[in-house]
Image: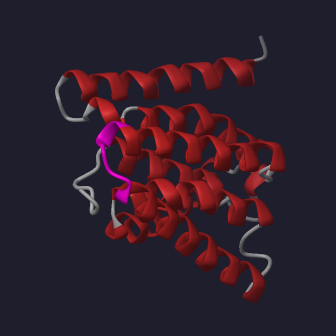
């Protein structure tokens, strides 16, 4: 096992442990569990790839869209309401549109992978509520800024031109999915 794969497995195990802890303490309902689990299983490899290679490959971003859609359908069935799907669709379209606009206006600031990633994370954030979409973008920018500061302090030559945005967006989405304050469609 390579060291990168080992680190990813440790990260996945730690994040899944947090989710289980939230669930057993009744902080997360069982019907919502597929969402943070999917974000963990998809997000760690996506973030690791973006940090190492500074790109989000189509194989991962497009798969994330399909998996997220299936998970959100399961959540809607478990929760007994289709409203979650409308909220998720709104979130996915809104976040993708915002990222696409930035990509088109300032192509160097975001990559195409970030735009595709915005679809699946936007759907998750939208399922939590419209406020979560706004908070997710704010947290993502904050995480990217903090990673940039850390990169400068640690003198990481790989991040000389800046820190990728995807890991911040994934971290923000994971945090909001694991610590949701409300569901707007409920």
- Front one among 19 and 51: 19
**Which residue is at a point 52% across and 61% down the rendered structure image?**
122
Q: Answer yes or no: is residue 177 visible.
A: yes
Q: Quadrant of residue 83?
A: bottom left
Against 166, residue 63 (above or below) is above
Q: Residue furthest bottom?
A: 105
Residue 84 position within the rendered picture, expressed as x and y whole percent measured from the top left: 38, 55
Against 4, residue 113 (above or below) is below
* Side (left or right) of 127 relative to 70: left
Task: Report the label total.
Answer: 0
Q: Could you tell me which quadrant the C terminus lies in?
A: bottom left
Residue 171 position within the rendered picture, expressed as x and y whole percent measured from the top left: 49, 48
**Which residue is at a point 54% across and 55% down the rendered structure image?**
121
Against 100, residue 27 (above or below) is above
* Side (left or right) of 113 relative to 98: right
Residue 74 position within the rendered picture, expressed as x and y whole percent measured from the top left: 46, 38
Q: Is 79 included in the stretch rendered in magenta?
A: yes
**Which residue is at a point 75% across and 84% down the rendered structure image?**
106
Magenta stretch, residue numbers: 78-83
Q: Residue furthest top?
A: 1
* Side (left or right) of 41 relative to 128: right
Residue 29 position within the rendered picture, expressed as x and y whole percent measured from the top left: 25, 34
Q: Answer yes or no: is residue 146 visible.
A: no
- Front one among 35 and 4: 35
Q: Quadrant of residue 47?
A: top right
**Which residue is at a point 27% across and 63% down the rendered structure image?**
184
Q: Could you tell me which quadrant the N terminus lies in?
A: top right
* Side (left or right) of 80 relative to 150: left
């Amino acid at each position: 096992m390579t060291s990168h794969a080992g680190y990813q497995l440790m990260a996945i195990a730690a994040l899944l442990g947090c989710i289980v802890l939230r669930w057993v303490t009744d902080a997360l309902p069982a019907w919502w569990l597929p969402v943070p689990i999917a974000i963990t299983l998809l997000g760690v490899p996506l973030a690791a790839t973006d940090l190492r290679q500074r790109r989000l490959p189509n194989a991962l971003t497009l798969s994330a869209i399909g998996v997220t859609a299936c998970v959100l359908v399961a959540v809607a069935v478990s929760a007994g309401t289709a409203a979650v799907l409308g909220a998720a669709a709104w979130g996915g379209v809104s976040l993708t549109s915002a990222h696409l606009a930035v990509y088109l206006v300032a192509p160097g600031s975001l990559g195409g992978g970030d735009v595709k990633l915005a679809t699946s994370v936007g759907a998750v954030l939208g399922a939590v509520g419209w406020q979560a979409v706004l908070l997710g973008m704010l947290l993502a920018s904050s995480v990217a800024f903090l990673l940039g500061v850390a990169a400068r302090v640690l003198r990481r030559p790989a991040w000389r031109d800046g820190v990728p945005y995807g890991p911040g967006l994934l971290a923000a989405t994971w945090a909001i999915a694991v610590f949701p304050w409300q569901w707007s469609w409920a």
